[in-house]
Image: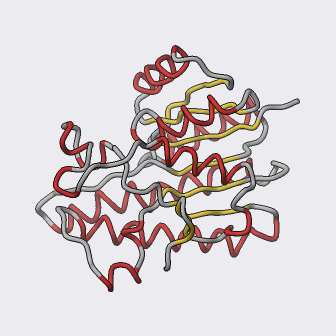
Amino acid sequence: MAPTTVLITGANSGVGYATTQVLASASEKFHIILACRSLENAEKAKSEIEAAGIKGTLSTVQLDVTNSESVKQAAELVGTKFGTLDVLINNAGMGSQNPDVKTRFQETLEVNVIGPAVVAEAFRPLLLKAEKPYSIYVTSGLGSLAAASASGSDFPGADCYCTSKAALNMLMMREWVAFKSKGLKSFAMCPGFVISNLRGKSEEARNGGRFGQAEDPKTSGELVLSIIEGERDSDAGGFVQKDGVWPW
């Protein structure tokens, strides 16, 4: 029986790393491809996860979401080796705090919106060959217009980060509308407030800083697992979180 192939961008830390751990520990049917900008970091993460003991299997591929040639080559390698892709998780993301507004937006949108668009375009032909394909965009509740209008967000880079996640949600929705008839199930998935390098690499920043104690990112991996196991199929095309759905 062919494995369920799952490609995760930005898989060497945070949500991507934790999701790899959860899926690889859940079942021998999963083969997870750690797609990272640095192949060295990808291999290090792979070795760490394997050393802890897993049921599934792992491989790595170099993929920089800001480099179209890198994305193209990664898609070709995956296509040659596996022939198809069951799950694509657009997880790589960043939040620029550059003081220059133009630079701040350019840096954030390039990684959080343009990157996923390029990755999805490159890998979608492989997804559409799968029996039950899933396309998951790792977004944030901070991308909810309804939530923003009610409370707003106050942290360095909130303007560009929140905007990028709202745009990412639209990217997912356009894919859902265009390809749901072909069996592709698309989701905008909010991982929740979890430990991550997104806020910085110091322990304080990773754990939430002044916003409170962040949760274990494995909770987001468990949400991904529930999605690709079909438990959230009724929410396809939606903005999901572990306890339900976010308002747009």
Q: Position of residue 62 (x, y in %)?
A: 50, 32
What residue is drawn where x is 45% and y is 24%? Answer: 45
Residue at the (18%, 64%) spot, across then down: 155
Query: Given the current orientation, which residue lies at the most extreme top position?
Result: 51
Residue visible at 66% across and 38% down?
76
Q: Is residue 24 left or right of residue 49?
A: right
- Is residue 154 toward the left or the right of residue 245 in the image? left
Image-based side of 134 in relation to 182, left or right: left
The image quadrant of residue 84 is top right
Q: Nearer the viewer, residue 37 or 214?
A: 214
Q: Nearer the viewer, residue 248 or 70?
A: 248
Please state the horizontal and vertical placement of residue 83, each as a whole percent of the image: 79, 37
Instruction: Please tell me how many numbered marks the rendered image carries.
Output: 0
Indicate whether 64 appears above or below 145: above
Residue 6 in the image: state x and y as whole percent: 66, 40
Q: Position of residue 13 (x, y in %)?
A: 40, 36
Please name whichever residue, 52 or 79, is drawn nearer the observer in this view of the structure: 52
Compared with residue 182, is residue 96 higher up or lower down, i.e. above or below?
above
What is the residue that sits farthest to the right in this orientation? 1
Which scheme is used to colour this image of the protein? secondary structure
| Quarter placement of the N terminus | top right
Farthest left residue? 99
198 is higher (above) or lower (below) than 154: above
